[in-house]
């Protein structure tokens, strides 16, 4: 009886239609599976872009942002969600400044940043710009310029234990960065404490700058007194 039913299924018109429908369904399922597999195999990989974790205020230096990763994080996003000009490498922010406030969860894009012009954009959160007025010899005869690295010496009259003042020359700071130079006014990048020390020295002593190479350091020399100069 079962064989007769199967035979009728293959020989009757209804049976043929039913088999065709079943075959079409199986083919459709196979096609969907294939297309999904193909789509997954050819879809582009996600892109790592920089996304703001908190508000980045207008005027924020890109140089500071490149080091202060608390402001942003690298996030993997599908390619079709990546905005035009999205920044993928924080090093591209060097020399740039935020032109507008950037809201949290926003992608960092090239049009949000522009060229930085001004000393304030070259300062980190704990850095200050302090101006020191020097004579020509103290400023290395005008050989100092923006980007120079200098040592700061101070000459003063120190009072000895016997109450007698003795002239000395003391190395105050090594390897300070020159932000600007105008005539005899030199703008140095310093910490808040260093700024106060330079202001005090400028008002009460004499400051000399010594031009140094941009790389390499040497041990800090001792305080120079009269005996080191005259041999007495």
Image (cartoon, helix red, strand yellow):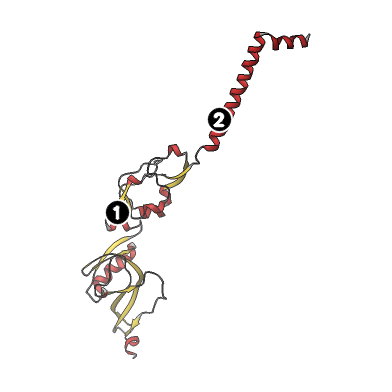
Closer to the camera in the image, 202 or 9? 9
Mark 2 vs mark 1, CA separation in Å: 50 Å
Task: Give the quarter of the image for residue 164.
Answer: bottom left
Picture coordinates of residue 17, whole percent (x, y): 63, 12
- Which of discs 2 and 1 lies nearer the camera? The answer is 2
Q: Are marks 2 and 1 in contact (CB under 8 Å)?
A: no
Instruction: Judge from the rendering whether residue 114 lies leftward or rightward of residue 79; answer left or right.
Output: left
Quarter holding the C terminus?
bottom left
- For disc 1, the marked residue is 116
Instruction: Judge from the rendering whether residue 78 lies leftward or rightward of residue 24; answer left or right.
Output: left
Q: Residue furthest right?
A: 1
Picture coordinates of residue 93, whole percent (x, y): 37, 52
Closer to the camera in the image, 226 or 4? 4
How crowded is the residue under tag 2: few (<14 C-alpha within 10 Å), some, or many (20+)?
A: few
Instruction: Judge from the rendering whether residue 85 lies leftward or rightward of residue 11; answer left or right.
Output: left
Q: How many marks?
A: 2
Q: Residue furthest front?
A: 11
How crowded is the residue under tag 1: few (<14 C-alpha within 10 Å), some, or many (20+)?
A: many
Residue at 33 percent of width and 77 percent of height: 170
SS label for mark 1: loop
SS label for mark 2: helix
Instruction: Judge from the rendering whether residue 81 lies leftward or rightward of residue 153; answer left or right.
Output: right
**In this view, 141 is above or below 230:** above
Residue at 58 percent of width and 30 percent of height: 34
Task: Give the quarter of the image for residue 101.
Answer: top left
Q: Residue furthest left?
A: 183
Picture coordinates of residue 230, whole percent (x, y): 32, 89
Residue at 46 percent of width and 46 percent of height: 74
**In this view, 110 is above or below 205:** above
- For disc 2, the marked residue is 35
């Amino acid at each position: 009886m079962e064989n007769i039913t199967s035979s009728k299924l293959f020989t009757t018109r209804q049976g043929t239609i039913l088999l065709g429908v079943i075959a079409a369904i199986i083919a459709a399922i196979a096609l969907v599976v294939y297309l999904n597999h193909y789509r997954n195999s050819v879809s582009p990989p996600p892109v790592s872009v920089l996304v703001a974790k908190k508000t980045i205020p207008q005027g924020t230096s890109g140089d500071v942002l490149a080091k202060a990763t608390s402001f942003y994080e690298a996030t993997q996003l599908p390619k079709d969600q990546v905005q035009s000009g999205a920044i993928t490498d924080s090093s591209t922010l060097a020399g740039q400044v935020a032109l507008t406030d950037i809201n949290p969860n926003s992608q960092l894009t090239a049009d949000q940043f522009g060229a930085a012009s001004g000393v304030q954009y070259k300062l980190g959160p704990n850095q200050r710009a302090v101006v020191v007025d020097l004579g020509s010899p103290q400023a290395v005869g005008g050989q100092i310029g923006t980007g120079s690295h200098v040592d700061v010496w101070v000459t003063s009259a120190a009072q000895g234990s016997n109450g007698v003042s003795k002239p000395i020359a003391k190395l105050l700071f090594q390897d300070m960065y020159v932000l600007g130079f105008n005539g005899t006014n030199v703008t140095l990048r310093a910490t808040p404490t260093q700024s106060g020390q330079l202001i005090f020295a400028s008002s009460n002593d004499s400051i000399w700058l010594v031009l140094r190479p941009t790389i390499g350091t040497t041990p800090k020399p001792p305080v120079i007194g009269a005996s080191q100069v005259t041999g007495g």
